[in-house]
Image (tube, rainbow, N blue to C red):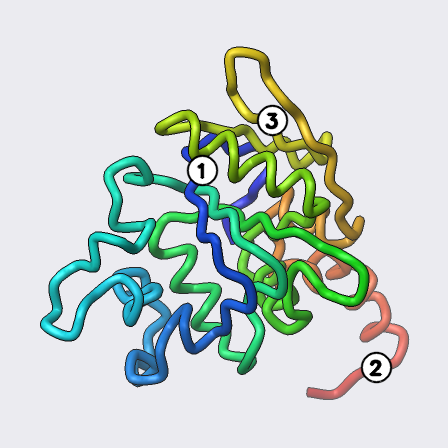
């Protein structure tokens, strides 16, 4: 996986809660056996009208969010089915991170989506509802607003005339995985010497 430690990019807001994985990448685009080509179909049914033309009212089709690489949404993002393709579509479109708000009894992200994201180097950031609302307000006020995500410091900074920063929590093992670009195989290979020693001691036959 590609390491992710610091990222600066344009913010794009999607003012919708309970965005499920079928909306992120619809089932008709899951036929490919390759892990590429999903970005162009991200939010397909929202991005395009029935005649195939772009829906000008959908945020990601608006010029102010061109080349955005940090997506900001509402609660329970990535709910629905467990399809890993949803994470691939978000990444292949160009997003490095997704920010969503948490509140009591309502998650910022669905658990399976969040787990798939960590395994594919897509950073999911949970902030309070008030903090996410402030990001929505500032993004609406400043066209092309950029933010920097510092994973080491666990901080999101909005590059306003007077910068605003938000701290976020993240599981230590997920943080290590993202910073060092480790997938499941990479994590296993970190213990290669211990595994080899174990096999030698136990005379493992392959």
Looking at the rendered structure, the secondary structure element under dot 1 is strand
> Which mark sits nearer the N-terminus, 1 or 3?
1
Q: Position of residue 53 (x, y in %)?
A: 12, 63
Residue 23 against residue 60 in the figure, above or below: below
Please name the residue that numbered disc 2 is placed on.
203
Indicate which label's residue lies in the foreground, 3 or 2. Answer: 3
Q: Position of residue 112 (x, y in %)?
A: 64, 73
Instruction: Check the picture and name the quadrant holding the C terminus.
Output: bottom right
Rendering quarter of residue 34:
bottom left
Please name the residue that numbered disc 3 is placed on.
157
Q: Nearer the viewer, residue 110 or 191?
A: 110
Q: Nearer the viewer, residue 105 or 111?
A: 105
Q: Residue furthest right?
A: 201
Indicate which label's residue lies in the foreground, 2 or 1. Answer: 1
- Report the residue at 36% width, 29% height from top: 144
| Mark 1 neighbour class, 10 Å CA radius: few under 14, some 14 to 19, many 20 or more | many
**Is residue 49 shown left or right of residue 38?**
left
Please name the residue that numbered disc 1 is placed on.
11
**Is residue 59 shown left or right of residue 115?**
left
Looking at the rendered structure, the secondary structure element under dot 2 is loop
């Amino acid at each position: 996986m590609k390491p992710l430690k610091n990222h600066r990019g344009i913010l794009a807001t999607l003012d919708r809660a309970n965005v499920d994985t079928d909306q992120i990448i619809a089932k008709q685009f899951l036929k490919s056996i390759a892990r590429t080509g999903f970005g162009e179909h991200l939010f397909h049914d929202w991005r395009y009208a029935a005649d195939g033309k772009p829906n000008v009212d959908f945020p990601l089709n608006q010029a102010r969010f061109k080349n955005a690489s940090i997506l900001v949404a509402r609660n329970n993002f990535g709910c629905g089915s467990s399809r890993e393709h949803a994470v691939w579509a978000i990444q292949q479109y160009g997003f490095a991170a997704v920010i969503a708000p948490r509140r009591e009894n309502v998650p910022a992200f669905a658990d399976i989506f969040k787990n798939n994201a960590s395994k594919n180097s897509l950073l999911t950031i949970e902030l309070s509802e008030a903090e996410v609302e402030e990001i929505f307000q500032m993004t609406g006020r400043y066209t092309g607003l950029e933010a920097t995500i510092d994973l080491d410091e666990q901080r999101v900074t909005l590059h306003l005339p007077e910068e605003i920063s938000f701290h976020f929590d993240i599981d230590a093992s997920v943080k290590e995985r993202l910073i060092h670009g480790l997938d499941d195989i990479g994590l296993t290979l970190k213990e290669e010497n211990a595994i080899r020693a174990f096999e030698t001691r136990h005379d493992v036959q392959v």
